[in-house]
Image (cartoon, rainbow, N blue to C red):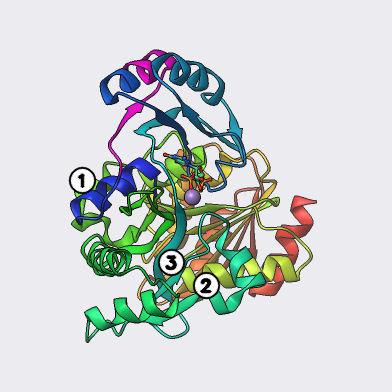
Amino acid sequence: MDLYEYQGKELFRRAGIPVGEGRLATTPGEARQAAEVLGGPVVVKAQVLTGGRGKAGGVKLAGGPHEAEEHAKNIIGLDIKGHVVKRLWIEQASDIAKEYYLSLTFDRGVKKPLFMFTTQGGVEIEEVAATSPEALVRLHVDPLEGFHPWQARRLVYGAGVTDPSEQKQIAKIVGQLYDAFVRFDAMLCEINPLIVTPEGVVKALDSKFTVDDNALYRHPEIAAMRDDDAADPLEALARAKHVTYVKLDGEVGVLGNGAGLTMSTVDVVTFAGGRPANFCDLGGGGDAQGVVDALSVITRDPQVKAIFFNIFGGITRCDEVARGILQALGEMSLELPIVVRLDGTNAAEGRQILADAAPPNLHVAPTMLEAAARAVELAA
Ligand code: GDP
Ligand code: MN
């Protein structure tokens, strides 16, 4: 789950990382009031779940309340890479002497959290990595040993920060960022830019914070930060129904039991010359309600022309799933063709149950490849 800048900054603040003072606004009037309360110049920042807001005109400095209101009028409703701005963060403006970059993420290859730090902040980090890779200091933390203060010093000295006060402040933030990463079950914490003011104060001017969805049950207050309006409406519906669903761009709706099988199903549809419309994992069970929920999410997508339901019976028996499918089809009016491949435990019984009932739009195929080919053909 990605957090908005202001939400990430709130978690930074709880971890002790210095951030500017600000207020949330959803109307130009609220932006003006926020600027009045904060006093002095402010920065009006679009809150969208994507980067590059500055370049897109979503970050503007304002001398005072009137100008903040004017900027708010222009920024609300702005489309930044497909994200329409509805919220603004009004923050006391900072003077910037230097812009650094600090992040902590998972290096899946090495199976360890990875710090990246450079004094060339403010720009896209991919640019720094491409043009001056030597300026980007990388450092892994062994999760079993935990973080050691010398690691922060290695990052800071390695990047060539020479000012002792800056060194000290940044090293402290590095440790705090590690604590925040662990405490809030983050997958990514990025500060770009981490600024130094003309007075020599280091603080986080931006935040990009991603929390592991699987850990949200431990953080109800973070889970409550989710903005369902910003999510794809189908994905939001799926979440409400506890269905694992990812929208894709094709015509063949994909449903499988188990994430691995479902991934293979997406592949095999592509292999058969079709385009998957989605990834949808039914999970372990195959009860009628689960099938109804999954099918209702998949068929809400108008691009779907046929559905490929791929079941491998393990603990879940194919005859049970077959009954679930029939019950589901009985409960909902589904006109799209649906191709079912059943294999594994009690596959023969399952296929027999489907054959006996034989709804006209239901096709049973014995193998994954044949089922995929059939579904692709029916979707064409
Ligand atoms: P992003 O473009 O989505 O990464 O948004 P940022 O929060 O990083 O802001 C973009 C840029 O706006 C920053 O790199 C700064 O140069 C500038 N900016 C943001 N806040 C302030 C501020 O308080 N004062 C000044 N002078 N510039 C700011
Ligand atoms: Mn930024």
Residue 46 in view of the camera:
yes
Q: To which quarter of the image does residue 115 belong?
A: bottom left
Q: To which quarter of the image does residue 303 belong?
A: top right
Residue under label 3: 319
**Callout 2 touching callout 3 (CB < 8 Å):** no
Single out the mark in the foreground, 1 or 3. Answer: 1
> What is the number of the mark on residue 221?
1
Q: Whole-percent x and y of residue 351?
A: 54, 67
Q: Whole-percent x and y of residue 355?
A: 58, 61
Residues rendered magenta in the picture: 20-33
Q: Which amino acid does label 1 sit on?
A: Glu
Q: Whole-percent x and y of residue 331?
A: 45, 39
Name the residue: 20% across, 56% down.
15
Name the residue: 38% across, 49% down.
198
Q: Does mark 2's beta carbon lie closer than 8 Å to ligand 1?
A: no
> What is the number of the mark on residue 250?
none
Name the residue: 26% across, 68% down.
168
**Could you tell me how far apart the alpha carbons at marks 1 and 3 are, in whole angstroms?**
42 Å
Earlier-in-chain disc, 2 versus 3: 2
Residue 113 in view of the camera:
no
> What is the number of the mark on residue 261?
2
Q: Which amino acid does label 3 sit on?
A: Asp
Q: Which amino acid does label 2 sit on?
A: Leu
Earlier-in-chain disc, 1 versus 3: 1
Q: Whole-percent x and y of residue 132?
A: 62, 73
Q: Does mark 1's beta carbon lie closer than 8 Å to ligand 1?
A: no
Name the residue: 46% across, 66% down.
257
